Image (cartoon, helix red, strand yellow):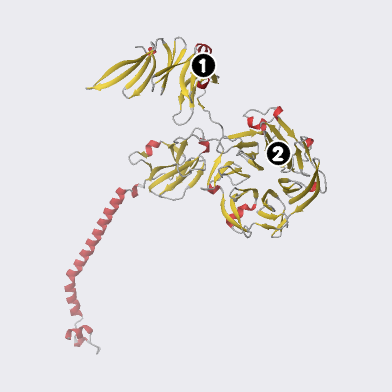
Amino acid sequence: MKKSDVKALYAINKNTFNLLTKDGRLMRLTFSPKNGKTDLQKETDFKHKYEVTFASYDYQFLYWIDENGWLFMKNLSSEQTIFIKDMKEIISRYGIVSEITTFKNDIYLAFKSNGVLKLVRNKGYRAEEVNMKIGIFSLLKDRYQDILWIGTDGQGVEMYYNKPDQFQSLTLDQLPFNLQKPVRAIYTEKDQLWIGTKGGGIVCIENYDQISSENVAPTKAKSFTSKDGLPNNQVFAIQKSHYSDILWIGTEGPGISYYSFTNNKIKTPNGSNSNEIEKVHSICETNDSTLWLATAGAGIQKVIFQSTNGVIRIKSVEKFTFENNGRICNEFHSLTNIKKSTLLIGSRGGYGLIKFNTESYEYSFIPMNSKEYSAIGDVLSVHQSKDSIFYIGASSGLTKLQFLPHNKTKFIQQFDRRDGLANDMIHGILEDKDNCIWLSTNKGLAKYNPQNNYFHTYTQGIEVTEFSDDAFWQEPGSNRLFFGGTNGLVWFEPGADKKPVFQTNFSFFDLKFSGKSVPWSDYFNSQPQQIEIPPKVRSFTISFVAADNFHSNNYEYSYQLKGYSSSWVKLQKNNAATFSNLPAGDYILNIKFNNDVFNAEENVHSIKIRVLPSWYFTSTMIFIYMILGLLIMLFIIWKVRMKIKKKQKHSPEKWKKNKEKNYWKPSSISSPTLPMNYVLHLL
């Protein structure tokens, strides 16, 4: 049989292969080793009546195209053969077929010169183009995730998948007019998206949910600037009125503006002291004639207005500033109505939180005597959760607190980068339906789970990573969250992107000594399954990865070096751990990873590390030291014993000489005193 006669060859087990030949025979080849020889048995399981021009094997299915241009599929489990489609017209149009496979119940065909074609099963195998710009050599289904890998001619390997993006982004360069100003206010009304910018006025986009990566059509976007009634193009707040069909608009000023849905116009009402209203960052409407405004420099303002036949007129403006230790506090960004007559005000400049009674005008500063909670001084955002916990976003992290009876405050906890936040600057705070807290920071979106105090930062799939003050919004009646930043905005519905359930393939893959990669196999001892670090190496780095083609950039890591410390070190997105000057000994490196704030403790992988001692501290040398020490001790003992024996040998003669020398003779005594040894001798 010639090689060209074989159209498909695949293994059934280690001794059995199937062979589809040019003449349409499906043959089974079985190899049986006997007495040092191998017997080959041939069986024909199936015979197609027409000559086969192309065949492709796909694990469970066998595909072939015969001389008539007909495509067939054989289910290798059920042994059922199915006619799929007449491919003559498709082949004449797209050329030579290089691969056929099944992906998500549809059949995909690769062409050597004209990309990939999909035959949609639930549409009678209707042909749809996938990518017809390049030549394709091969197709491969991923074993772990719903991915089809495409081997191209000259453009590497492409990943094809059908997965909705978790985050939708709109960048300002997609708008039909030139607008490069930070987003500072967001509001949605039905299918309309309202965007307030710092210097570019307001943009209203129709059917925003249908926006893709392409530019917004001019007919779908409308711009409002000072030419259209805004007193200033710096817009910081947009809020729907609870009592009339208007949008309140806070700007740099002067005045407070509104957009009327009745006549589709922006107006800035006149009236008593209306020019005193400026730099409005937050709006709180307490009744049908009263607004409370948080301003950046003009304090808290109470605005009384009157609406007559849809025309609004300012009746009075009252300004409130607050004194703390002799200093005047008048710059505010956040304003929250926590009770019927109580406002919680977030101040800038280190003054922290203020509780203000809108009836008695009494106020009190939230005490910040503790150094541990001093970071809530510069407040950017405030959010009250469903369980009445207050989250305070500041320039130095996130603080949780709770208000107790009798005007007492309970500080629960404060978080910063040491706790897993990628950045301490918290611009906006929102809560999803799972009671998780979402934070917009200077380095992406962070998600916080109050149940386990775990943080996770998202950057993958987000076109906006540096976010802005005031720019956050939750669509009423839905779980859709919005956050604005320096170059656009992001919206998403937490939980809508259900990550595929599969066992992540985790591996340790690189070893570096003092920043230079070395062969892993040279230092990995397979017998005890451990990495062995030579004694001369002062610093080494071990790299690792959780292989996930969908969410790889959203994984965060932490490590624990057991045997050296019991604490966990957060690495966030860094997937390498570096150690310096470790004492010789045995350690276990534990790696924990997660791509969400749930089940954060489950994914833990370990590897043993042995830091080898210097040659003079090896077990052999220690044994030699012990033998030498023992010999030295024996020598010392022998030496002492010999000295004692020598003394004992000469001591009788020495005593006799001493006795004669000290024996008393009367003729030699010049003193009446008798020697003591003579007295003892007489006795």
Residue type marked 1? Ser
Task: Identify the residue shown where x is 35% and y is 23%.
Answer: 12
User: Residue 608: where, in percent of width, then height?
Assistant: 38, 43
Camera-side residue of 408 and 463: 408
**Residue 134 in the figure: left or right of residue 271:** left
Name of the residue lying farthest toward the bottom: 672
Residue 131 visible from this viewpoint? no
User: Residue 519: where, in percent of width, then height?
Assistant: 40, 36
Instruction: Tell which tag, 1 or 2, sits nearer the viewer.
Output: 2
**Residue 185 in the figure: left or right of residue 527:** right
Q: Residues within 10 Å of mark 2 (few under 14, many from 20)?
A: many
Q: Quick one: SS at disc 1?
A: loop
383 is higher (above) or lower (below) than 499: below
The Cα–Cα distance between marks 1 and 2, rounded to whole angstroms, is 49 Å
Q: Residues within 10 Å of mark 1 (few under 14, many from 20)?
A: some
Labels 1 and 2: the sequence-earlier one: 1
Residue type marked 2? Gly
Residue under circle 1? 113
- Mark sitting on residue 29: none
Residue 568 visible from this viewpoint? yes
Camera-side residue of 113 and 281: 281
Name the quarter where the C terminus is drawn: bottom left
The quadrant holding residue 518 is: top left
**Residue 57 in the figure: left or right of residue 401:** left
Residue under circle 2? 196
